[in-house]
């Protein structure tokens, strides 16, 4: 008959084994918990009626709209909103903040579980710190006209992006009521590790 070595009869060994097994999977469990807790992306702007997409002399704000005279495609969604309107985290995650003179202006990028990222651009102010954890629905800043949104006749808007493994997705699809976040998209994950060139 199999005899348990006396080594395993000491109780602390079991605690040690438990720690060695459970500790490495803790981030995975946490990600799973977040995933179940937040199955959807929330709109980053609270609008009572519906999401209004920017449309003015400088172009259209929908995903894929032509930019730079047709040379590139718009890789986010421009949600029309007034300067100063609060901007909320669409999902929980680890936030980075930045400020560039052109392009995004003042922006926040939030890294979510499972390779998702959301980006919030042209902000007036940022109300969180760099490298900070933010929960879904928390205010992260205010709508502004920084970066290349700083034209008088351009409608104030939030430039909002959703990325999965560095691939830009159409945010409008995810902001429909009841649109669940896909759990895992292996083809995009594989493409990202193989290092296929980004479309934009
Ligand atoms: Zn935009």
Image (cartoon, rainbow, N blue to C red):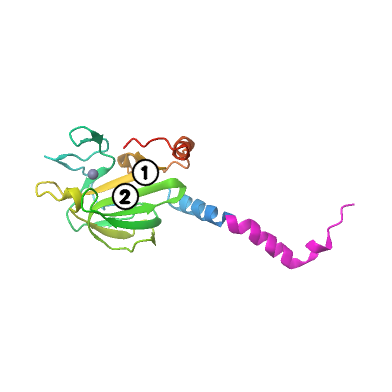
- Residue 190 is labelled as none
Q: As rendered, which of 107 and 39 lies closer to the eye? A: 107
In the figure, is residue 122 to the left or right of 165? left
- In 3D space, how far apart are the residues under numbered discs 2 and 1 (Cα atoms)? 8 Å
Residue 165 image position (x, y, % from top left): 42, 42
* Nearer-N-terminus badge (2/1): 2
- Mark 2 neighbour density, 10 Å: few (under 14) some (14–19) many (20 or more): many
In the figure, is residue 81 to the left or right of 57? right
* Number of numbered discs overlaid on the protein picture: 2
In the figure, is residue 32 to the left or right of 56? right
Residue 134 image position (x, y, % from top left): 38, 60
In the figure, is residue 40 to the left or right of 69? right
Residue 67 image position (x, y, % from top left): 21, 37
- Residue 119 is labelled as 2
Asked whether the beta carbons under mark 2 and mark 1 sit within 8 Å of each other, the answer is yes
Report which residue position mark 1 lands on: 163
- Tell me the SS state at disc 1: strand
Q: As rendered, which of 139 and 59 lies closer to the eye? A: 59
Residue at 49% x, 52% y is 31
Residue at 54% x, 54% y is 29
- Is 25 magenta? The answer is no
Which stretch appears magenta?
1-24
182 w.r.t. 121: above or below: above
């Amino acid at each position: 008959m199999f005899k348990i070595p006396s080594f395993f009869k000491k109780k602390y060994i079991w605690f040690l084994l438990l720690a060695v097994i459970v500790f490495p999977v803790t981030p995975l469990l946490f990600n799973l918990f977040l995933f179940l807790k937040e199955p959807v992306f929330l709109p980053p702007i609270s609008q009572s009626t519906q999401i209004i997409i920017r449309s003015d002399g400088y172009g259209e704000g929908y995903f894929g709209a032509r930019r730079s005279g047709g040379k590139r495609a718009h890789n986010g969604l421009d949600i029309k909103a007034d300067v100063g309107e609060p901007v909320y985290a669409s999902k929980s995650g680890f936030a980075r903040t930045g400020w560039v003179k052109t392009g995004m202006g003042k922006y926040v990028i939030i890294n979510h579980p499972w390779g998702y990222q959301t980006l919030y651009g042209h902000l007036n102010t940022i109300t969180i710190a760099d490298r900070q954890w933010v929960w879904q629905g928390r205010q992260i800043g205010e709508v502004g006209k920084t970066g290349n949104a700083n034209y008088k006749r351009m409608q104030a808007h939030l430039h909002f992006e959703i990325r999965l493994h560095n691939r830009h997705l159409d945010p409008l699809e995810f902001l429909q009521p009841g649109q669940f976040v896909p759990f895992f998209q292996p083809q995009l994950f594989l493409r990202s590790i193989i290092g296929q060139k980004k479309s934009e």
